[in-house]
Image: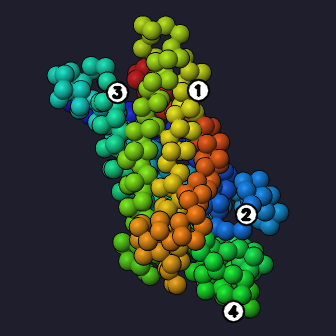
Amino acid sequence: MTSNNFRMDDFLAGWVGGASSVVVGHPLDTVKTRLQAGKGYKNMMDCIVTIYRKETAWGFFKGMSFPLATITAYNSLVFGFFSNAQRLIAKRRYGDERHPAGLADVAAASMLTGLVSVSMGAPIDLVKIRLQMQTHAAGVAESFQLAGGASSHNMAGVRSLHMSNGGGGFVGAYRGPLHCIGSIVRREGLQGLYRGGGAMILRDVPGYALYFLPYAVFCDLFKADAHDDAPHPFAIWLAGGLAGSISWVTATPADVVKSRLQADAHLHRKYKGVLHCILHSYKTEGAQVFFRGASVNVIRGFPMSATMFLGYELSLQFFRSF
């Protein structure tokens, strides 16, 4: 599974960890997206109850097929690139790829990973959010308000999320992930798939540093024996969960901007770019808007990341046992 300094097992283990984390975290990810990009929810519990009442339990899993198919590949890229970047840095700095990574090495590999991850992550997040923001019925469309003030008397803000079915009602504009991708490319070109990419860079470059660094620190802290190379599975689970919560709560302001840009309708678009979105959101809703969904991020960040790191580490041990 190796070629010179390059290893494929990290990519395979990242694929396993990514798949398990999607199943665990998608319901709260939907709540987070609705809180950040939508308007009219009083708080997290009100959002949960509203989704369940109007869309049933299926509403929490809306758009999951796409991330399940793609987040696995995305996390394979993240963990594979991060681990190989660490080895390359160790080879360049110390002459040995097996040299233990210092915190500066982990930070450098993390930030490079965050930058590279946007190439795949931006289109995935865009399609996921467009699907999550869809509703099934006209009644939901009338009560739902996109952030920025679209009202039930002015449906222009939600026309891109709904289309007439010819019979007077509304159906979801996107029939599924592939139809969503095709619609975005047809209306906005290939660059449309990277809407919100700038905000994602602002989120993920520091965000991954605050993901892998705490994980490394907590893993060392929770080791039963300082001489052990591999921490106990419970230590991995706990370290991963804490790292996820830290990373997501600090990334929330940039995540809010990214979600708003990606959920913004192509027709009657409100936000011209990252800076305009920040200023407009601040002027209309105050500084607190940038922490909308922070509680959801902290809560969902723990089980998602705990599952992610545990799946990754155990899979890696399995693949390297051959």
Residue 41 got which mark?
A: 2
Q: Residue at x 61, y 49 (%)?
A: 294
Residue 180 appearing in the image: no
User: In the figure, 243 relative to 287: above or below?
Assistant: above
The answer to which of marks 3 and 2 sits earlier in the sequence is: 2
Q: Secondary structure at mark 2?
A: loop
Q: Residues within 10 Å of mark 2 (few under 14, many from 20)?
A: some
Label 4 environment density (alpha carbons within 10 Å; few <14, some 14–19, many ≥20): few
Between disc 3 and disc 4, the foreground one is: 3
| Mark in front: 4 vs 1 | 1
- How far apart marks 3 and 4 lie (CA) works out to 60 Å
| Marked residue nearer the N-terminal end (1 or 2) | 2
Would you name the residue on which mark 4 appears?
A: 166
Q: Quadrant of residue 290?
A: bottom right
Q: Which residue is mark 1?
A: 238
Q: Give the Cα distance between marks 3 and 1.
A: 20 Å
Residue ID at (55%, 44%): 249
Residue 181 screen position, x and y as percent:
48, 70
Foreground mark, 1 or 2?
2
**Residue type at tag 3:** Leu
Q: Residue at x 47, y 29 (%)?
A: 215
